[in-house]
Image (spheres, helix red, strand yellow):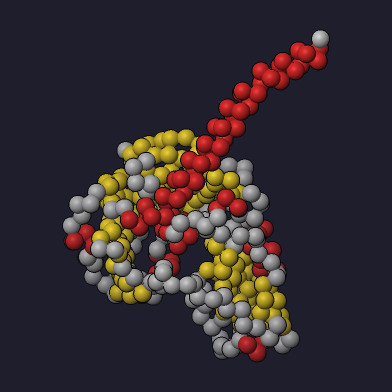
Amino acid sequence: MTHVVRALAFLLLLPALAVRADIAADSAADADYWLERLGPALNMTSYRGVFVYARGDQVSTMRVAHRYRDGYVEERLVQQDGANGEIVRKGMRVVCVLPDHGRIQLDQVIPSGPFAEAFASQPLQVSKWYVPEKVGEDRVAGYASVVVALKARDGFRYDHRLWLEKTTGLLVKSHVRTAAGEVLERFQFTSLEITDDLPDSDFEVQLEGREVRRDLPDPAASPAPARMNGWTLGWRPDGFMPAAAPRSGSGQAVAFSDGVAAFSVFVEPRGRLDMPTGASRIGATTAYMRQLDAGKNGFLVTVVGEIPPATARRVANSVAIDDAMAFTVQPQ
């Protein structure tokens, strides 16, 4: 009789188990649908608003106007706190104006996170490295949104949570989190207007000061090949594929992305500088530095990106110098 009762109880549970499995499958399907909309929405949605970007104890507020017209993107970012500054993008041409600074680098003032290249293109095979799930709905800056969680499948990368506006798929809020749920980095619109009615004046440089111009790489072109001339990288987390090589001064650099996160490896002659080594972290961005000797030559290995410190350390420790003569040592 006991066996019969157990069998009946199991049969009664089957519908509930089937419903739960269907819910999980539907949730994953919903998440994939929203992730497919994310990349196009970032470029092709026209809007203006103010957003806050926080990592660690650093908080920045910026006003943004973004328009997609005649097949190319126009965008203007204006800093709302600290030094005056603005960035205007028209197609592949970017102009940066920071009147209160002598030397400026665009990479230091263009916010990362949702405006980074990893978020600007459709995630590639994300489900291999993250478990996507639609976890609910919310409202951000007055707009109804869906919430999609990306849980890392290993300990080599962080979790992400994305809030996407329901009509357009525009990213309106995001978190970068540890496996324990600690929020390391956050982005959120505090005011937002999604509209096609944006005047040309919203996209003109309005501040006076020194201008720095740069042409962005053509997204339709293949990324620059990884440059590992004279050195090798023995390990990197699965899924991080070579991306466009960053600028590296007198050294060499390669960049890697898994479609959501990215990190870069810089290898350069150490010269006479005695640089500190070890890891530092601001929000979700880790910088790990290691000194490396090859014969009579000293080198500095730096790993920077949205990866945990232990991952950055393992990547840096896997760098080996095969040919020191491949580097041109610059006098310090």
Q: Is residue 236 left or right of residue 145?
A: right
Q: Is residue 233 left or right of residue 112?
A: right
Q: Is residue 291 left or right of residue 172?
A: right
Residue 10 in view here: yes
Q: Quadrant of residue 87?
A: bottom left
Residue shown at the point (33%, 75%) measured from the top left: 213
Residue shown at the point (66%, 51%) measured from the top left: 154
Find residue 5 and report its horizontal and vertical position in percent.
76, 12
Residue 190 in view here: no
Find residue 192 and report its horizontal and vertical position in percent.
30, 46
Comparing 254 with 220, the one in front is: 220
Residue shown at the point (20%, 54%) measured from the top left: 198
Comparing 179 with 167, the one in front is: 167
Q: Quadrant of residue 85?
A: bottom left
Total numbered labels: 0
Q: Quadrant of the C terminus?
A: bottom right
Name above or below for residue 296 compared with residue 26: below
Find residue 199 and report its horizontal and vertical position in percent.
18, 57
Find residue 39 and report its horizontal and vertical position in percent.
42, 55
Q: Quadrant of residue 96?
A: bottom left
Q: Quadrant of the N terminus?
A: top right
